[in-house]
């Protein structure tokens, strides 16, 4: 193994609060552990969890904390004699709360190849939401109909397409601005807000087999209770308290095969991947503020 010294510019926060708690720290990385690859990051998606950890809504990481769950980049060092990957390969995958940095160390098992025809900002923003969406669909099990609250966001956009691929009829909620976009993903789009139950029943009069909430508000819970079958699944990924014991929380499970499936679909042009906006890494604070607004269409991505 080569014995290289690498530095990394890392996004950190030493306290909880709005995005002005974010700062950069230059660190020297330790010797690369066995089974890991060192990646020079080219792009990394932001997920709401990053910003929610920044504010202190979730404190499990402690302080100071680093951020980021997904990335794409180039391997600059590898400590795994049995791997097919080598220095110079372009890869993408999941990191564990440490991808918003210029150089990162990632278990080789988390990596998959970045196809040449997938742009950096797309490749860097797939892992978190793709694996979340697949986890939810797999754990709900076989269904014919699904209501998606928040269909235009990061997870919503891919769960709609994965559900359609499985032959599931999908009704997806969004603001007026995103109705056409949600329709283009293959769902029947319905505008959220007052009268949502009635609007859903107009386009889908039967009871749903399941619903999944990406928003975490009371309307999503109440509407689901009205339109999902009595023995159907009412799920949430929002990680917020709910008013009904019927609501089942789902949590992402990492699975490179599931990630590969989504990457293959994007490479083949089967799945569309919407980039809401990109921000240079130096402007991460602006990007974190934007995702907290809760109206991302597709993904917000940091570029390096
Ligand atoms: N449990 C897990 O393992 C897990 C994994 C990933 C994410 N999450 C959580 O799941 C949530 C969604 O993640 P994400 O990446 O999809 O978020 P996101 O990209 O920020 O989603 C924002 C979307 O929510 C929509 N929205 C806002 N208010 C709405 C409402 N009242 N009704 C319907 N849609 C509404 C917005 O649509 P408009 O712009 O049209 O308003 C926007 O498209 C976040 O809270 C995140 O932390 C959990």
Image (spheres, helix red, strand yellow):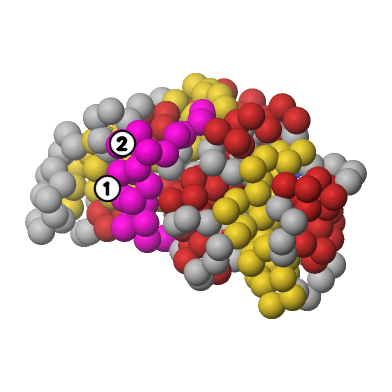
Queried on whether the Cβ of the residue with tag 1 lies below 8 angstroms from ligand 1, the answer reads: no
- Tell me what residue is drawn at x 75 percent, y 34 percent: 175
> In the figure, is residue 274 to the left or right of 121?
right
How many residues crowd mark 1 within 10 Å: few (<14), some (14–19), many (20+)? some
Magenta-highlighted residues:
254-275
Judge left or right: residue 107 versus residue 167: left
Q: Which residue is mark 2?
A: 267
Q: Residue at 41% across / 25% down in the picture? A: 304
Q: Which mark is residue 112?
A: 1
Q: Residue at x 53, y 38 (%)?
A: 185
235 shown above or below 42: below
Label 2 near ligand 1 (CB < 8 Å): no
Give percent across and percent down for residue 168: 53, 56
Nearer the observer, 296 or 14: 296
Magenta run includes residue 196:
no
Residue positioned 56% across, 24% down in the render: 277
User: In the image, is residue 263 part of the stretch drawn in magenta?
Assistant: yes
Circle 1: element type: strand
Which of the 4 quarters of the picture holds residue 283? Answer: top right
The residue lying furthest to the right in this view is: 194
User: Which of the pair 36/166 is nearer the observer?
Assistant: 166
Which of the labelled discs sits on residue 232, or is there none? none
């Amino acid at each position: 193994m080569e014995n290289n010294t690498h530095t990394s510019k890392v996004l950190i926060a030493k306290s909880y609060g709005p995005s002005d708690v974010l700062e950069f720290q230059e660190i020297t990385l330790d010797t690369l552990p066995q089974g890991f690859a060192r990646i020079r990051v080219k792009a990394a998606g932001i997920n709401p969890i990053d910003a929610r950890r920044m504010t202190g809504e979730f404190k499990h990481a402690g302080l100071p904390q680093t951020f980021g769950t997904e990335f794409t980049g180039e391997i600059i060092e590898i400590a795994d004699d049995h791997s097919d990957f080598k220095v110079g390969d372009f890869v993408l995958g999941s990191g564990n709360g440490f991808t918003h940095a210029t150089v990162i160390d990632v278990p080789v098992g988390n990596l998959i190849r970045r196809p040449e025809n997938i742009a950096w900002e797309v490749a860097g923003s797939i892992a978190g939401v793709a694996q979340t969406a697949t986890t939810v669909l797999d754990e709900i099990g076989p269904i014919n109909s699904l209501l998606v609250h928040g269909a235009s966001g990061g997870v919503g956009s891919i769960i709609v397409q994965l559900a359609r691929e499985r032959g599931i009829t999908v009704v997806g909620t969004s603001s007026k601005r995103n109705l056409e976009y949600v329709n283009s993903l293959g769902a029947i789009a319905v505008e959220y807000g007052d009268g949502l139950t009635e609007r859903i029943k107009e386009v889908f009069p039967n009871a749903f087999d399941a619903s999944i909430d990406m928003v975490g508000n009371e309307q999503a819970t109440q509407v689901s209770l009205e339109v999902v079958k009595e023995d159907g699944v009412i799920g949430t990924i929002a990680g917020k308290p709910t008013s009904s014991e019927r609501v089942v929380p789902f949590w992402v499970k990492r699975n490179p095969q599931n990630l590969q499936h989504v990457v293959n679909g994007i490479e083949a042009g089967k799945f569309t991947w919407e980039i809401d906006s990109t921000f240079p890494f130096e402007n991460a604070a602006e990007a974190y503020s934007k995702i907290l607004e809760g109206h991302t269409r597709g993904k917000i991505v940091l570029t390096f």
